[in-house]
Each structure stands twice: as C-alpha cells, then as structure tokens.
Amino acid sequence: MNQCKVMNDGYLEKRSNGLLQLWKKKRCVLSDEGLRLYGCKGDSGKEMRFEQMTTLDCVEYKRGLVYFTIVMNDGKEVDFRCQQEGTAWNAEIALALVRFKNRVAVQTGRNRHLSHLGSCGEGDVEL
C-alpha cells in the first residue's frame, strides 16, 4: 500500500486475539487498497487488504463508542471500536471496501467481454 491514495489516518482500538481479548489502540491508515494497522511502538504494521476482506458487519453504538467487525475471506473476524463523536471509520472502511469490490467487478466484466470478443472472432473481417 506504499503508493496508494490515503483516505483516512487516525486511531482505532482493535480487540486482541488473546485469552483476555483486550482492546489495544492502533494507528490506522485507510487507503484505496486496504487498512494498515500500526502498534503504539512504531512497528512496521499489519496490512489488511480489501481483496482479503468479505464485509464490514456488526455496527453497534454503546456508551459513545462505535463497535464494528471486519470479516475476512477465511472467516476470521477482526473487531474494532472507536469514538462515536467526530469519526466515521466504520462508514469510511465500508465505502472503500465497496468501491474496491466494484472496481474489481468492472475489471472482471471487461476482461470477460474482451475475451468473449476475441473468441468469437469479431475482430476478423474478410472482404
């Protein structure tokens, strides 16, 4: 995601996978290709690419926080939360995911159309 368009940069809390499932604050960078998560210690970050995501689910509002889940293609669920005021991370991620999937669908449709035209021989005209 090095040369991708950055759409949002800020902080979310991610629920850990451990036994206690603690909430850990992560710096997140949303781009047109996915979401990159950085720990507070300035690590290299974990990349969650849109091509690996299925959907964004379970938007819930409780005590000034927004809770949401990103579902990955392998069925893994990643839980996040953020402040309800002044942020719309869940909506921004969902819209970026839809834009990405639409872009892929359009490209797939074009490729099918072009391969169909090539196999039908419509480009070859005899005089």
Image (cartoon, rainbow, N blue to C red):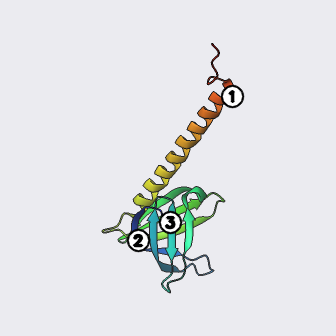
Q: Quadrant of the C terminus?
A: top right
**Real-space Cα separation, disc 3 to disc 2, in angstroms:** 15 Å
Q: Nearer the viewer, residue 110 or 118?
A: 118
Which residue lies most toward the left here? 86
Q: Secondary structure at mark 3?
A: strand
Where does label 2 land, which residue? Answer: 82
In which quadrant of the rendered view does residue 86 lie? bottom left
At horizontal 45% and vertical 65% (from top left) the residue drawn is: 30
Mark nearer the N terminus (1 vs 2): 2
Q: Residues within 10 Å of mark 2 (few under 14, many from 20)?
A: many
Residue that carries the numbered disc 1 in the rendered image: 119
Label 3 or label 1, whichever lies nearer to me, is 1
Q: Label 3, on which residue?
A: 35
Q: Earlier in the sequence, mark 3 or mark 2?
A: 3
**Among the 4 quarters of the image, the one containing residue 77:** bottom right
Farthest residue, direction top: 127
> Where on the picture, by quarter, is residue 75?
bottom right
Q: Earlier in the sequence, mark 3 or mark 1?
A: 3
SS class, disc 2: strand
Viewer-proximal residue, 110 or 38?
110
Q: Residue at x 45, y 60 (%)?
A: 93
